[in-house]
Image: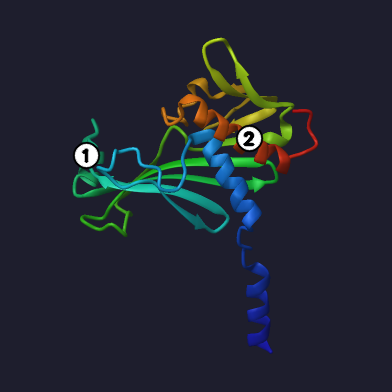
Amino acid sequence: MACSAIALTGCFERTPKLSQDEEKLLDATTYLFTGLEDNLDETSGKGMPWQRSVKGRAIDYWRITTNGIGFSDDEMNRKTRPSRYVRYTYRVSSPEPCSFAFEDITEFSKNDSQEDFSAYSMHNQGNGITFNLGNAHTFQFEEDGWSTYLRIVGPRAVCYASGGCENAWNDTFSGLLLGRISGDAHLDRRKKALAIIRTACPGKDF
């Protein structure tokens, strides 16, 4: 009976996997805000394209490159110089309905390993940004005569793990896209991703 009780407890405590609809929503969110997708090649065939993997209730987009990073801090150089590889990861999750959290992580390999990246890790500019679309009354593309940008407006619509929230945000200077998006074809695909998210998050006058 004790064994049965333990097994039953494990079943209740196990985190449910992402459904297909949830994966589709997170993929759309990732593309809308970062331009990342599975097998995206940013190196013209000279490096690993971006890979996609599901990790619990989150989706990771990651790639591994040869370590060429140097720091002005001697202690950080001491920790990372033996690392032959660096793994870059964008992680997106939905901690609450219509809330999407991004992490931007750089990890250094343990010596020559491409599996163990425990030597050192750090969170970058994109880390800790949460878009609270349930708070937004504006979530759309707008034009300023020069470009088309994504705009979000609403109380505490965008919050940062480092502290503070914003009531208005646009992706012009966010640093999330990193030049991955250009031209009408990309804009059309971003608009489709936006439509997926807005369909999943009804109830606001977007």
Quadrant in the picture for the N terminus: bottom right
> For mark 2, does the 10 Å Cα neighbourhood hold few (<14), some (14 to 19), or many (20 or more) residues?
many
Q: Earlier in the sequence, mark 2 or mark 1?
A: 1
Please report the residue visible at 51 percent of the width from the left and 26 percent of the height from the top: 184
User: Residue 13: percent from the left, percent from the top?
Assistant: 65, 68
Q: Is residue 160 visible?
A: no
Res. 104 image quadrant: top left
Closer mark to the observer between disc 2 and disc 1: 2
Q: Is residue 15 above or below residue 188?
A: below
Q: Which mark is residue 43?
A: none
Please report the residue visible at 56 percent of the width from the left and 21 percent of the height from the top: 149
Q: Which mark is residue 68?
A: 1
Please report the residue visible at 74 percent of the width from the left and 28 percent of the height from the top: 206
Q: Is residue 195 above or below residue 52?
A: above
Please report the residue visible at 47 percent of the width from the left and 44 percent of the height from the top: 37
Q: Which mark is residue 194?
A: 2
User: Residue 197: percent from the left, percent from the top?
Assistant: 66, 40
Front-most of 14 and 191? 191
- Give the residue type that dot 2 points to: Leu
For this orientation, the residue located farthest to the front is: 185
Q: Is residue 189 visible?
A: yes
